Structures are given as C-alpha cells and as structure tokens.
Image (cartoon, helix red, strand yellow):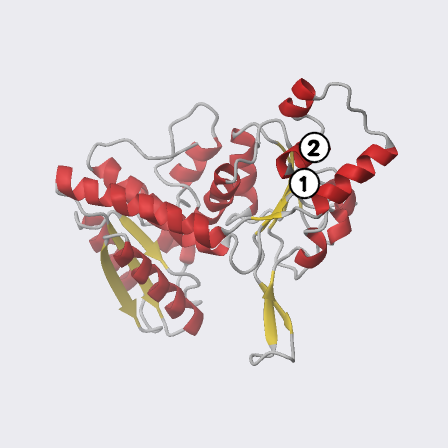
C-alpha cells in the first residue's frame, strides 16, 4: 500500500496507470493519498544496507582468494594527528579486516614533506599486494593535495576521484570507470536496493561539490533521471525542491531543507552531517542532516536518517571499489550492479 501511495503521488506509476486508469487527482482524492503516504514514510536504513553490501564483498573476496590466490589490499595514508582523521582511518581498517582484506597503514607526522609523501604513494603504486590507495584528507597546508592525489595510479584509485575515473563516469558510452566516488555511489545503492525507480524521475541535487554534488548528479543522469543541480546561487531553491521526485541534499547546512518543501511521496537522500546545539544531551549537541528530518518524513515516501543513512555507505563503497580494483588487476570484470 505504501508503494501504491507513493507511486500515485509521483504521477507516472505503471501500476497506477495499469490497474487504476480511472484515478483522477481531485483535491479530496489527493488529500487522501497524501495523508496515507505521510503516515507511511519508509526510513532507508543505511546501516542494514551497508551490512548487506559488506557481506557480499566478503563473499567475493573469499572467492577471489580461493580461485585466484588474490587478497584485495587497501592502503590508507594518514598525515598528522587530527582526531577525526584518525577515527576515520580506524573505521576503514576495521571494515577492511571484516571483509577479509589485506590492510596497509602508512602514518606520518605533520612535518612530513611533500616529496616524502609522494615517494610513499609511488611505493604503494608498485606494491602488487595493494590494489587500492586512499590518502586521508585534509593534508597539512604545506602539501599540495592535488599533486599527491594525482600521483595515485588510476588502477589503484580507491576513492574514485582520479581524472580518468571521473571522466569515464561522465562520458556516455565510454569506458567503465574502475572505481566510483564512494559517497555518490552509496546514494545510488540506497535508491537501487530500496527499489526506488530513478529513470524518468525529476531529481534535484542540492550542492555542487566535486566530492558529492556533481558526481551524484552524473550518476543519476546516467540512470536516466532528469537532474537539476542547485547551489548557493540558485534562485527559488524551495520551488525546485517542491517539484522533485528525488531530492539529494549535500549542501552542508543544518536542516536547511524544510519538510513542507518536500513533494508528497518524494524520496529524500540526506548526505549532510552537521551538529546542532542540544544542551539536554551529554555532548551538548546532536548530529543532523541538511534536511529537517522530523517534518520531511511527514511528506516523503522514503527518507534517510542522519546518522545511519548515507554515512555507513561511504566505507562500504570504498571496500567495493577496492574489490573491483583487485578484480581488475586479476583480469576479472567489475561487480557494478547498475
């Protein structure tokens, strides 16, 4: 019933057209469907979906080891002592171990020179047991991040941000990228594994960063979504969002997208990770997304929470990229599912 409500409200449902051709959107009729749909918003569980993906990755990694003698290897390079970066690296190392990957850690003091860091990347490029390389950002100001990232071979680009991978992702009918940007790919996986149709839908991406906004817009378009990219200079952002069947919010502004902006039955993917004051909690703050979750779930047919939505998918897709790079090195095709 939830799906029927949402599909009806999205205007172009095959089920509605086929099985309910007499339906017309009178005001009373629409109010009924809106009220029914708003009470049934599906919470898209990124933790559960990422766990499902990790289990698949572990199975494929085991088969790769048994059939070809290859263990996927992920190298993570950490510079400095930032608490957040160190936490991310620990999470990635733990995740790699859970899926039976070989893990390599390279840590440097903040005083490391750019030349030393580049030599580390070159050594990892030459290591046959390493299939994916990730340099944890940000780097100290005296190091050119672009220079370091460009030194990573495209065949070992675990983040999916090399010029070759991005270019192949954007070119219609071109070569398949060896890896996809992790968070954007995670957004698509959430939609696909939640059986949410992208083709033909009006998709609004809020944010145009190279990390999330632009790549996820290209991926949605490659799956035949009709994509509008909004940003800080967009006029009438609310109007664009109100027309969207799928909203991907990645603007980095706490709860900027209000619930009544969301078209009834729309799907919301909230990439934002912000904090807001919460004096009643031990930490004094709460994490929240770019969308006002409490009000948006009253209008959406499906929505990701923050935390627990997009976040867990980023590491899962990093692992999937590393597996695909290991398969590529072995002469096997990628395991992209869409």
Pinpoint residue 226: horizontal percent, then vertical percent.
63, 30
Query: Which sits in the foreground, 309 or 250?
Result: 309
Asked if residue 66 lies left or right of residue 43, the reply is: left
- Quadrant the N terminus occupies: top right
Asked if residue 50 lies left or right of residue 251, the reply is: left
The vertical placement of 6 against 76, above or below, is above
Q: Are marks 1 and 2 in contact (CB under 8 Å)?
A: yes
- How far apart are labels 1 and 2 at the CA level? 7 Å
User: Could you tell me which residue is drawn at 44 percent across and 51 percent down?
Assistant: 48
Asked if residue 210 lies left or right of residue 334, the reply is: right
Query: Which sits in the foreground, 280 or 132?
Result: 280
Pinpoint residue 266: horizontal percent, then vertical percent.
67, 40
Q: Image quarter for residue 324? A: top left
- Quadrant the C terminus occupies: top left
Q: Which residue is mark 1?
A: 266
Is residue 150 something that shows in the picture? no
Q: Image quarter for residue 86? A: bottom left
User: Could you tell me which residue is drawn at 24 percent across and 38 percent down?
Assistant: 327
Is residue 77 something that shows in the picture? yes
Pinpoint residue 4: horizontal percent, then vertical percent.
65, 33
- Of labels 1 and 2, earlier in sequence is 2
User: Could you tell me which residue is drawn at 31 percent across and 70 percent down?
Assistant: 112
Query: Which sits in the foreground, 95 or 82?
Result: 95
The vertical placement of 28 against 112, above or below, is above
Report the number of numbered marks: 2
Q: Which residue is mark 2?
A: 10
Secondary structure under tag 1 reads: loop
Q: Which mark is residue 122?
A: none
Q: Residue furthest front?
A: 1
Secondary structure under tag 2 reads: loop
User: Could you tell me which residue is drawn at 32 percent across and 43 percent down?
Assistant: 56
Pinpoint residue 98: horizontal percent, then vertical percent.
28, 56
């Amino acid at each position: 019933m939830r799906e029927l409500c949402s599909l009806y409200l999205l205007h172009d449902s095959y089920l509605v057209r086929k099985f309910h051709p007499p339906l017309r959107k009178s005001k009373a009729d629409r109010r009924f469907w809106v009220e029914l749909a708003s009470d049934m918003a599906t919470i898209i569980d990124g933790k559960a979906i990422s766990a499902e993906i990790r289990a698949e990755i572990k199975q494929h990694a085991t088969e790769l080891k048994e059939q070809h003698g290859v263990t996927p290897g992920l190298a993570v390079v950490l510079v400095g002592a930032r608490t957040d970066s160190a936490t991310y690296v620990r999470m990635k190392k733990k995740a790699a171990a859970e899926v039976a990957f070989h893990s390599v850690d390279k840590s440097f003091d903040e005083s490391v020179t750019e030349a030393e860091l580049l030599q580390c990347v070159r050594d990892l490029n030459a290591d046959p047991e390493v299939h994916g390389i990730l340099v944890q950002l940000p780097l100290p100001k005296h190091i050119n991040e672009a220079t370091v990232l460009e030194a990573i071979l495209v065949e070992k680009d675990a983040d999916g941000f090399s010029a070759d991978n991005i270019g192949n992702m954007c070119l219609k009918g071109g070569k398949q990228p060896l890896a996809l940007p992790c968070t954007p790919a995670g957004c698509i996986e959430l939609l696909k594994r939640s059986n949410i149709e992208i083709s033909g839908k009006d998709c609004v991406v809020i944010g145009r960063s190279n990390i999330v906004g632009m790549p996820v817009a290209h991926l949605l378009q490659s799956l035949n979504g009709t994509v509008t990219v909004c940003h800080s200079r967009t006029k009438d952002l609310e109007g664009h969002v109100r027309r969207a069947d799928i909203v991907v919010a990645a603007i980095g502004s706490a709860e900027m997208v209000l619930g009544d902006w969301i078209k009834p039955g729309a799907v919301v993917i909230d990439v934002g990770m912000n904090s807001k004051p919460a004096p009643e909690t031990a930490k004094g703050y709460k994490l929240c997304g770019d969308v006002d979750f409490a009000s948006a779930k009253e209008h959406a047919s499906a929505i990701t929470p923050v935390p627990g939505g997009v976040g867990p998918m980023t590491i899962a897709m990093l692992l999937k990229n590393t597996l695909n790079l290991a398969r590529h090195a072995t002469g096997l095709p990628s395991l992209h599912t869409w």
